[in-house]
Amino acid sequence: MRGAAGADESRVFERRESAVRSYCRRFDCVFDTAEGSVVRDVTGREYLDFVAGAGSLNYGHNDADMRAALIAHLEQCGIAHSLDLSSSAKSAFLAAFESLVLLPRRLDYRVQFTGPTGANAVEAALKLARKVTGRSNVVAFTNGFHGVSLGALAATGNRHHRVGPQLPLPGVTRMPYDGYQGAGVDTADLLERMLRDPSSGLDAPAAIMLETVQGEGGLNVASAAWLRRVAELAHDSGALLIVDDVQAGCGRTGTFFSFEPYGIVPDLVVLSKSISGYGLPMALLLIRPEYDVWQPGEHNGTFRGNVHAFVTARVALTKFWADADFTAVVARRADLLARGLAEVADSVPRAVPKGRGMMRGVDVGSGELAATITRRCFAEGLMLETAGPYDQVVKVLAPLTTEDEQLQHGLDILLAAARGVDRGPDVGPERDLRGSSGLVPA
Ligand code: PMP
């Protein structure tokens, strides 16, 4: 009955839902239940979910322990909404975050609960950096993605998102990300020169904001040397270093924070997506204490503390981050994934494996080809999305908890799909158009 009703009701999406809907166009079925890395549609068909809520489901769907804690909280009439009032759920989360995430890493951050999306927390970071420094300009990078509200959008490169508001998107200077100008060019040289040169036209920045792995921008990985140098340049020029760890954080690259292996300590860190552990909306801005200069309520919002998310987030931290076991498992799966994707890349002419940790994919050279491959995968029961300026990167964001056999099964489907496609004409030159440079066409 449910299946029949669902199928019938599905027409309501075309009838009523805005044309802005996107993922549902690619995965054209009505989803119903999910567990771990598997989702089921209303007809009972199962799919391996390697989209994972665009990185919001690092621990898979409906983790049994998080679900039990949430149900217990609901059944005892635990607080559901509390503005930013203190609650037992919030104190339990903060204490777990302090003891399991901050202290073991010798990090000292104040935690700001912003509105519950990544963009909300990015807006808070930009505003705070501007307040701290008294400067307005922010350096962001080609192919960066930081959200689509106006302040965050100014820092986002992708033209598809940027032209929507038909407004100037001020306050950001775009610089080339690591590797943007090819392997032989260190783009930090240009940044350094422009920061030092009083006549470069680059206004002294309030912040330099970056992703260590660009999730939406095509799984571009910044090198350790580049990241360290940019961190130094931020420090030397009096700018705050903001690491946007919305997608790369919470274990996605192998460590809790994506910047951990490089020994850099950002001034501000943005976290969202998988911080609740359960796919519930939640976002944090981590602030080095000396920069926590907000006046009470100066940056506020009705939904700053999602109490249900605090409940599941605490369980996620205690279950997965109390020791090094999970990190070791993720490292093993990341190797499996890297090997599988290297094979996929070998099967497509000029394709290149991309990414780091469990944040990986394959640049197959054209959006059309990537779409064909992901469509074939979906027909075989595997959900994958695409990234990059031309959507030319087939992206694998499997939950970190995906069993090895499931991961291998997904990779087998992807490999078969990549081998089976008709590639059509060579599409190489498309890459040079730089659709995610942040330059809006005249
Ligand atoms: N920053 C990064 C790195 C992201 O990947 C995203 C979302 N893809 C955002 C910010 C914006 O998050 P949200 O969609 O929750 O506003």
Image (tube, rainbow, N blue to C red):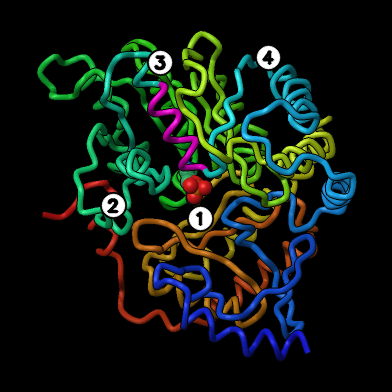
Q: Disc 1 designates what residue?
A: 353
Identify which amino acid the numbered label 2 is placed on. Arg
Question: Which is nearer the eye, 256 or 352?
Answer: 256
Name the spot of residue 403 as percent of width and height, x first: 80, 58
Dividing the picture into quadrants, the one containing residue 367 is bottom left
Name the spot of residue 381 as percent of width and height, x first: 67, 77
Question: Which is nearer the eye, 223 or 95?
Answer: 95
Q: Which mark is residue 232?
A: 3
How far separated are the C-alphas under marks 4 and 2? Answer: 38 Å
How far separated are the C-alphas under marks 1 and 4? Answer: 34 Å
Instruction: Of the two numbered discs 1 and 4 on the same chain, state the one appearing first in sequence.
Output: 4
Q: Which mark is residue 48?
A: none
How far separated are the C-alphas under marks 3 and 1? Answer: 29 Å
Q: What stretch is highlighted in magenta?
A: 118-128
Identify which amino acid the numbered label 1 is placed on. Pro
Q: Residue placed at 38% from the left, 49% from the top?
A: 148
Q: Which of pointers 3 and 1 indicates the residue nearer the eye?
A: 3
Q: Residue 106 carries which label?
A: 4
Q: Residue placed at 46% from the left, 83% from the top?
A: 15
Q: Disc 2 designates what residue?
A: 162
Disc 3 residue lies near ligand 1 with CB under 8 A: no
Q: Is residue 106 left or right of residue 180?
A: right
